[in-house]
Amino acid sequence: MLRDLAREPGVLGVEGERFVPARLRVGHVSYLTSLTGLPPDGRLRRPRDQALRPVTLAPQGLTLSRMLAERLGVSPGDSVRVEVLEGKRGVRDVEVASVVDDIFGMNAYMTLSALNRMTGDPGVVSAAELYVDDSTLPALGRRFKELPVIEAVTMKASAVASFLDKIAGLVWVSASVLTGFAAVMAVGVVYNNARIALQERAWELASLRVLGFTRAEVSAILFTEFSIETAIGIPVGLWLSRIVVDLMARSSSNESFQVPAVIEPRTYVAAAVVVVLAALASAWTVRRRIDHLDLVAVLKTRE
């Protein structure tokens, strides 16, 4: 079949894969899943970890997602009983070769040749990944629909376009709204902190003004404390944000997929810039209030 597909006009590369329903059992713990057989040197489909690095499958044995390995309570070197649920429905004890932080689901991978040897079905594939010339996609789509051995055809470009059209737009809207709320909260917290500091120190600042301190000197006393608080708060806030994002990602993960917590450096920079700009705007506003401080009224209020 793979050779026939490779001869189709416009097909530049073909790789086969196989999916075998199976029950993995370790002691009294079992999990119903499917074994995915992939070429060891495949390029069209390779499992990736949470850092999007390609995962190299071991020539022999199972490569399990970390979540599945934790469910079964196994680690590399342990043995898993594999009960195949199709064909000859054999039972084999297979060693766990490696555990990866996979993104999608509770997966169990093997090389295609090792999977076919285990099931006793050499040369069997369930699906084929094709690398084709874009200009031949319409003709190939019509051609594949006519072939009785092909049950379904999925085009990666169409799937990505559909995702961007239906899902990505909602994600961007949600992210924009949350970002707006976060920016407003950051500005509000910084400005409110500056206002409270001025309110609490108003009597001392007014007293210094009466004693002969200039407006700039009085402002410097207040803003030095404010600047130190901001300088300490930014790295602490960025560190806490990472913890919060990790917790949110873990709560969103399930057996179908895991959501990796990915924060790009520019996100940290943008957050820090927002806080710094809010601090500067708050300092400018508070400075204007200091310049127009009614010394007599403030000193009387203290009394």
Image (cartoon, grey):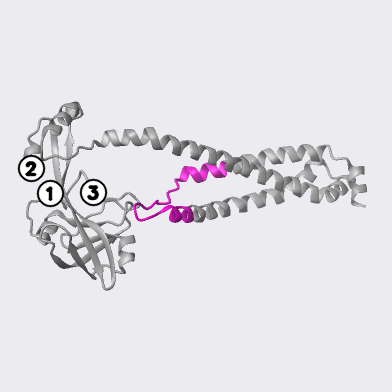
> Where 202 sits versus 84, above or below?
above
Q: Regarding mark 3 in the picture, which secondary structure is present there?
A: loop
What's the mark number on residue 225?
Answer: none
Q: Secondary structure at mark 1?
A: loop
Lower position in the chain sequence, tag 2 or tag 3: 2
What is the distance, in whole Å, between disc 2 and disc 3 at their CAs?
A: 21 Å
Residue 221 seen in the current view: no
Gap in Å between the C-alphas at discs 1 and 3? 16 Å
Query: Residue beneath label 2, please?
Result: 1
Label 3 sits on residue: 46
Q: Which residue is mark 1?
A: 125
Residue 178 visible (yes or no): yes
Q: Are there few (<14), some (14-19), or many (20+) residues within 10 Å of tag 1?
A: some
- The residue located at (18%, 37%) in the rendering is 131
Q: Specify start and end residues of the magenta stretch as a single range.
A: 246-273
Q: Earlier in the sequence, mark 1 or mark 3?
A: 3
Q: Quadrant of the N terminus?
A: top left
Image side of residue 269 versus residue 64, left or right: right
**Is residue 167 magenta-colored?**
no
Q: Amino acid at mark 3?
A: Arg
Q: Which of these two is toward me, 215 or 123?
A: 123
